Amino acid sequence: MFYGSYKNTLDTKGRLIVPKAFREQLGEQFMVTRGLDGCLFVFPVEEWNIFEEKLSKLPLTNKEARKVVRFFATGATLCEIDKQGRALIPEMLREFAGMTKEVVIDGSMKRIELWSREKYIEATAADDIDASMEALDGLDIDL
């Protein structure tokens, strides 16, 4: 499980140093794809396989299901961590997430979220967790 938040920067080649705590759980290879709210999702290969299986069960005849599969699958890239603890984030994914230099690396339980600093501030500044919890009422999330 991935927990915590870290800040780092992309180098000129688009490489990002992955926090040591996350590197150990990710392994040598992991999947990166477009995420929701303008971030990137990072999955250990095993978690990606579970996610991929769920996507593959969506009905091909449903237009919205095809959009969801396309969104996650077309951006998915297998990445590796080098000996210095860096991972190259593909240019297409950096552009999607608006990543140019400063990156926020958030643990999100079974996955990691990569954010441009600007998008992260924007996405979290207006967070109203009380309204979000109310919207999830009935989903058996009792705190």
Image (cartoon, grey):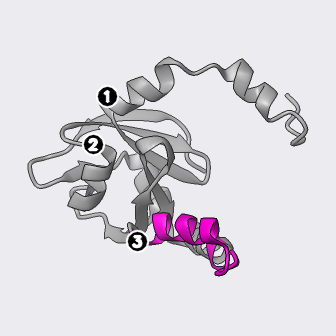
Q: CA distance from mark 3 to mark 2?
A: 18 Å
* Mark sitting earlier along the chain (1/3): 3
Asked if labels 2 and 1 touch by Cβ distance under 8 angstroms, the answer is yes
Residue for badge 1: 118
Horizontal arrangement in the rendering, residue 13 relative to residue 53 (left or right):
left
Q: CA distance from mark 1 to mark 2?
A: 8 Å
- Front residue of this view, candidates 132 and 65: 65
Residue 76 percent coordinates (x, y) = 41, 69
Horizontal arrangement in the rendering, residue 111 relative to residue 128 (left or right):
left
- Front residue of this view, candidates 35 and 86: 35
For mark 1, give the secondary structure.
helix
Frontmost of labels 1 and 3 is: 3
Q: CA distance from mark 1 to mark 3?
A: 25 Å
- Please name the amino acid that badge 1 sits on: Glu
Magenta part of the protein: which range?
55-74
- Please name the amino acid that badge 3 sits on: Thr
Residue for badge 3: 74
Residue 85 percent coordinates (x, y) = 27, 55
- Judge whether 125 appears above or below 7 on screen: above
Horizontal arrangement in the rendering, residue 127 relative to residue 8 (left or right):
right
Residue 77 percent coordinates (x, y) = 36, 70
For mark 3, give the secondary structure.
loop
**Residue sticking out furthest to the left:** 12
Residue for point 45% across, 57% down: 24
- How packed mark 1 is, by other alpha carbons closer than 10 Å (few <14, some 14-19, many 20 or more), is few
